[in-house]
Amino acid sequence: QLQLQESGPGLVKSSETLSVMCTVSGDSISSSNYNWDWIRQPPGRGPEWIGSLYYDGSTHYNPSLKSRATTSRDTSKNQFSLTLSSVTAADTAVYYCARVHRTSSGWVPFDYWGQGTLVTVSS
Amino acid sequence: DIQMTQSPSTLSASVGDRVTITCRASQSIHSWLAWHQQKPGRAPELLIYKASSLESGVPSRFSGSESGTEFTLTISSLQPDDFATYYCQQYDTYPWTFGQGTRVEIK
């Protein structure tokens, strides 16, 4: 059974860099069958897509983040991570990692999610 | 960005009711539309993808349909476990975007 587990700092100071890790068990993040994405959800609001890490290591990001987001991976540990620089209070949210399944008939978005980790940006 | 507009924002219904939630895309998304259910304090869960394909393990009372840029999620007979918030999400074009959500509450 696939499992995704986020880990994060809980609290980050304004203007600093936020880092969140996702550990995947039950499948390989190097498999060409999947992309690995980050989504966040501010308190009381809807989800916002942050970015995607493809199986080949290429990435796509939400332009709304103005190039502050970076995703990377450690295939030996089957982990991928998100860093978000120059954070403000607007970056306070639950951060989720999720899988996108690439099938022959099209993609299936977010068929598995982590439980999420709340990151609060303080001044 | 493609805007996803859901209606209604809140829906009050009783167990056994037929419930319909609508999502309109600001441009064509070629059926690349998913529906997710979220309960308080939990991660969202995928219900439907490609507008009308039921995710494995999801009860058959959930169904999806489309007409142009308008998409519909229907719950044929509302069950106690279905009281939650529902989000549509397009995955046709980056950045992928979500609707603002529809909260289904007990009448």
Image (cartoon, coloured by chain):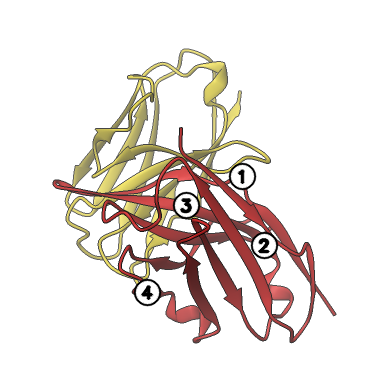
Chain colours: A red, B yellow
Q: Amino acid at mark 4?
A: His
The verdict on a common chain for dots 1 and 2 is: yes
The residue at the far left in this view is A104
Instruction: Give coordinates of residue B12: x percent, y percent.
Output: 56, 29
The verdict on a common chain for dots 1 and 4 is: yes
Q: Earlier in the sequence, mark 4 or mark 2?
A: 4
Residue at the image position 33 percent from the left and 28 percent from the top: B56
- Kindly identify which residue carries mark 2: A93
Q: Nearer the viewer, mark 2 or mark 3?
A: 3
Locate residue B96: give its quadrant: bottom left
Instruction: Give coordinates of residue B97: x percent, y percent.
Output: 40, 62
- Kindly identify which residue carries mark 1: A115
Q: Amino acid at mark 3?
A: Ala
- Kindly identify which residue carries mark 4: A60
In the picture provided, is A103 more to the left or to the right than A19? Answer: left
Q: Is residue A44 visible?
A: no
Q: CA distance from mark 4 to mark 2?
A: 20 Å
Q: CA distance from mark 1 to mark 2?
A: 13 Å
Q: Earlier in the sequence, mark 2 or mark 3?
A: 2
Q: Nearer the viewer, mark 1 or mark 2?
A: 1
The chain ID associated with circle 1 is A
